[in-house]
Image (spheres, helix red, strand yellow):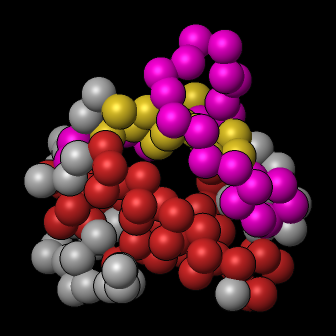
Amino acid sequence: MLDTLDVASRLDAMRASHNMLPHLARLGALFSETVLLEIDDAEFYLHFEKGHLAEIQSGPSRKTPWRFAFRSDGDALDAFWQVHPVPGFHDIFGLVKIGRGRIDGDILCLVKNLRFFKEFMALGRQEIRA
């Protein structure tokens, strides 16, 4: 099971990986939004600026506006971030379909930037080296 510290370190590793992938920056070139990532009771606000993850802010915060949210439990996200996830845990919409994830907010914004966000979330599947 993931705890808050595991998620924070995973997000930092994802940011580092993201900065080394120019194709991901191109996919998100028009994406400058804040996304809420909620795992169990922990909240993380991902601030994207023109396809780059500019800041990761820990929550909860009632004052931080977000465009859309992806919510899941730690066990499901841990299964999603496996190098070879099992069916149902292979995709954010797969998590929603099996009842282990939820997407709230501006769905149109997510759909317009779907490939970018899905590829960003999949960066967590890489092994973290200490």
Looking at the figure, which quarter contains the C terminus?
A: bottom left
34 in magenta: no
On the picture, is 13 further left or further right than 66?
left
Q: Position of residue 3 (x, y in %)?
A: 23, 47
- Residue 117 in the image: state x and y as whole percent: 59, 62
Q: Is residue 24 visible?
A: yes
Residue, far top: 62
Horizontally, residue 40 falls left or right of residue 117, namely: left
Query: Is residue 90 shown above or below 8?
Result: below
Q: Residue at x 29, y 28 (%)?
A: 41
What percent of the width, then of the height, locates residue 71? 37, 38
Q: Position of residue 6 (x, y in %)?
A: 30, 56
Residue 2 vertical position relative to residue 40 in the rendered view, above or below: below
- Residue 50 painted magenta: yes
Q: Which residues are magenta?
A: 48-74
Q: Nearer the viewer, residue 16 or 97?
A: 16
Residue 106 visible here: no
Between 110 and 54, which is closer to the camera in this rendering?
54
